[in-house]
């Protein structure tokens, strides 16, 4: 799907890749970026001090339309307690969590803003889709012209149905409520579909947007948090409602970001109108090669480069490259580390990965 003698900007290259069309070369991204600690480590291992890591590697550029899908007004963030190792805070979306003070880590979640129907009724007030503050101060004809003419793909990011419900009430309460109070969960997810549509309406109608990404994170290492039956009942109709609305505005690349092993849900995501899944965690037995064989060109993919291989060294990195890189040949796949690049990856190992990737892209683009 590559053709000599043409040169595309990052926007056209991304779009052609996602539509299995001829291109000058595959897109070059680290889609989920890097931990802050990773960059700090690399500054001591050869990355020039203060250098932006994306600029250093000259990744293709992309940009997001900054629409605010969060609660307005926000909660007032505050530190509730802290010691030498940990800090307990309330975030601006009302979650109380415990974090390590000295490094990025998975937080321990302590409390959530919605505990019952009364809490939900109070929370709904903060999700007015017509609040003018949801759009940036720069929203103007000038910005719309920029989105129309810029040389990089423009995305719009939303929080998904499971993802938002989990933010509101926490994972245990949400999972139990699917069975103890299904009408309430239907109400929340129906509300969220309408909210996403009305909040994004102006952006989709007026801006040139190339893709929509929906954050869910609804699986763990061994499988999804809910069954396919539950997903079909509660989420597929709302996914269809939102994705139909998005496609009606000319956007046919609709991504879902979920960690873990979500494979039992893949056919339902496709049924719901999603056609790209990422980051495809290898440790959770997600395999882009097997997914391509199973779903063909119906499923677009980003990710699936095992972050653990980047810590293990050159031999493991070569094995990942040999197996995954050939998926770039026909399009519909962008290699990227299967989460934000963690701080246990040495700079030299990441350089090895990037050299292999650039060499492969150059080879198939000659």
Image (spheres, rainbow, N blue to C red):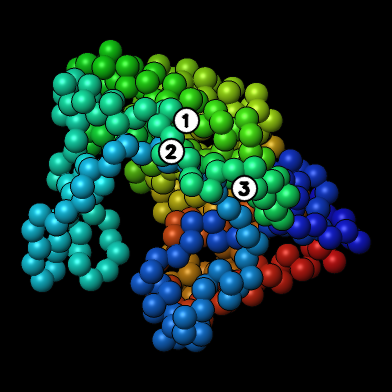
Q: Where 230 falls versus 133 (above or below)?
A: above
Residue in the image at 63% along x and 34% along y: 206
Residue 236 showing in the rendered view: no
Residue in the image at 14% along x and 64% along y: 86
The numbered dot on residue 199 is: 1
Residue in the image at 16% along x and 29% along y: 115
Residue 155 showing in the rendered view: yes
> Element at badge 1?
helix
Residue in the image at 68% along x and 70% along y: 358
Structural distance between the alpha carbons of marks 2 and 3: 15 Å
> Element at badge 3?
helix
Residue 42 percent location from the top left of the image: 44, 80
Q: Which residue is mark 2?
A: 134
Q: Where 4 falls versus 248 (above or below)?
A: below
Q: Which residue is mark 3?
A: 143
Q: Residue reaching furthest top?
A: 183
| Disc with the residue nearer the chain's start (1 vs 2) | 2
Question: In the drawing, does residue 307 fall left or right of residue 26?
Answer: left
Residue contact at pointers 1 and 2, CB within 8 angstroms: yes
Question: In the drawing, does residue 170 fall left or right of residue 344?
Answer: left
């Amino acid at each position: 799907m590559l053709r000599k003698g043409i040169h595309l900007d990052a926007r056209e290259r991304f779009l052609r890749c996602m539509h299995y069309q001829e291109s000058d070369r595959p897109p070059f991204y680290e889609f989920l970026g890097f931990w802050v600690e990773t960059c700090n480590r690399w500054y001591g291992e050869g990355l020039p001090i203060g250098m932006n890591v994306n600029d250093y590697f000259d990744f293709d550029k992309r940009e997001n339309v900054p629409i605010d899908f969060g609660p307005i007004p926000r909660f007032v963030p505050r530190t509730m307690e802290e010691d030498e190792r940990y800090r307990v805070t309330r975030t601006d979306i009302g979650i109380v969590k415990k974090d390590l003070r000295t490094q990025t880590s998975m937080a321990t979640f302590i409390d959530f803003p919605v505990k019952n129907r009364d809490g939900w009724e109070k929370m709904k007030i903060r999700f007015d889709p017509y609040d003018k503050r949801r759009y940036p101060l720069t929203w103007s004809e000038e910005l719309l012209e920029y989105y129309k003419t810029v040389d990089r793909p423009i995305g719009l990011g939303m929080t998904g149905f499971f993802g938002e419900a989990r933010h509101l009430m926490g994972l245990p309460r949400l999972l139990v409520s699917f069975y103890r109070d299904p009408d309430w969960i239907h109400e929340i997810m129906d509300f969220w579909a309408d909210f996403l549509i009305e909040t994004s309406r102006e952006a989709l109608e007026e801006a040139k947007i190339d893709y929509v990404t929906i954050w869910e994170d609804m699986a763990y290492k061994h499988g999804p948090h809910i069954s396919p039956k539950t997903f079909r009942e509660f989420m597929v109709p709302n996914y269809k409602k939102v994705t139909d609305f998005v496609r009606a505005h000319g956007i046919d690349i609709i991504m879902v970001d979920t960690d873990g092993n979500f494979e039992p849900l893949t056919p339902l995501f496709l049924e719901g109108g999603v056609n790209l899944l990422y980051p495809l965690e290898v440790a959770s037995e997600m395999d882009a090669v097997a997914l391509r064989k199973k779903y063909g060109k119906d499923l677009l993919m980003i990710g699936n480069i095992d972050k653990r291989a980047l810590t293990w060294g050159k031999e493991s990195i070569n094995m990942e490259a040999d197996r995954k890189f050939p998926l770039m040949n026909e399009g519909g796949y962008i290699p990227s580390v299967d989460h934000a690049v963690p701080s246990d990856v040495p700079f030299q190992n990441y350089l090895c990965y990037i050299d292999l990737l650039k060499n492969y892209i150059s080879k198939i683009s000659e």
